[in-house]
Image (cartoon, rainbow, N blue to C red):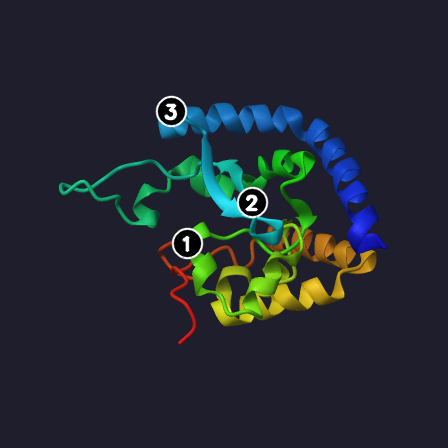
Amino acid sequence: MYKNKFKRIFDFVIVLFAFLLISPIFILLTLGLMVSNGGNPFFFQKRPGKNNRIFTIIKFKTMNDKRDANGNLLPDFQRLTPFGSFVRKLSLDEVPQLLNVIKGDMSLIGPRPLLVSYLPLYSKEQNRRHEVRPGITGWAQVNGRNAISWEQKFQYDVWYVENTSFLLDLKIIYLTILKVVRREDINNSEEVTMKPFKGNS
């Protein structure tokens, strides 16, 4: 009942209230990143959602677009701006996804939406992560985030799909707050983000 009906109502009510509450912070972050990046404060990208439906995710842009002499983007840690690093450490780069939740593309809790290019690389079991709406945070994020392997992350995602409940979502929200406060598992290397998923060996 909760998974198929009340979860969407819970998402919409909680997230709409939260967005209105933090709207002044949202505006300040937007202006700060606009100055820090020398342009667009937002990052847009196509991601697969529930039932593999493609949608456009929105995040705060924490890295600039600096390139080397050959025109290639510099490594992540070299493009991460000081203000962007502050935003990322507090996981504030995820805040604009509240708009994705309000629209219905995402949920507050669920498997993180990954790249469209990963779709053909999943096993049948791993692709089950798309049976629910993707989330801003999820079971994998409170159990290691970028510090765990892709295989472990997908196992956590599928476990969540099979065990979704109101109490579990409340637990994940609580654990997410603890992770943010303690600044745990923000990244697993100097690359800032995880290494790309290359499929199952």
Kind of residue at badge 2: Leu
**Front tag of 2 and 1:** 1
Residue 39, label in figure: 3
Query: Does 86 sit left or right of 182 as displayed?
Result: left
Determine whether 167 is above or below 55 in the image.
below
* Residue under label 2: 90
**Front tag of 3 and 2:** 3
- Mark 1 is surrounded, within 10 Å at the Cα level, by few (under 14), some (14 to 19) or many (20 or more) other residues, namely few
Residue 129, label in figure: none
| Whole-number angstrom distance, CA of label 3 to CA of label 2 | 22 Å
Q: Nearer the viewer, residue 102 or 81?
A: 102
Q: Nearer the viewer, residue 111 or 143?
A: 111
| Whole-number angstrom distance, CA of label 3 to CA of label 1 | 27 Å
* Residue under label 1: 117
Q: Farthest residue toward the left?
A: 69
The quarter of the displayed image where residue 84 is located: top left
- Percent position of residue 180, x then y: 61, 51
Along the polypeptide, which appears first: circle 3 or circle 2?
Answer: 3
- Percent position of residue 4, x then y: 79, 52
Label 2 SS = loop
Q: Farthest residue toward the right?
A: 1
Considering the image in quadrants, where does the N terminus appear? Answer: bottom right
The quarter of the displayed image where residue 45 is located: top left
Along the polypeptide, which appears first: circle 3 or circle 1?
Answer: 3
Label 3 SS = loop
Q: Farthest residue toward the bottom?
A: 201
| Whole-number angstrom distance, CA of label 2 to CA of label 1 | 28 Å
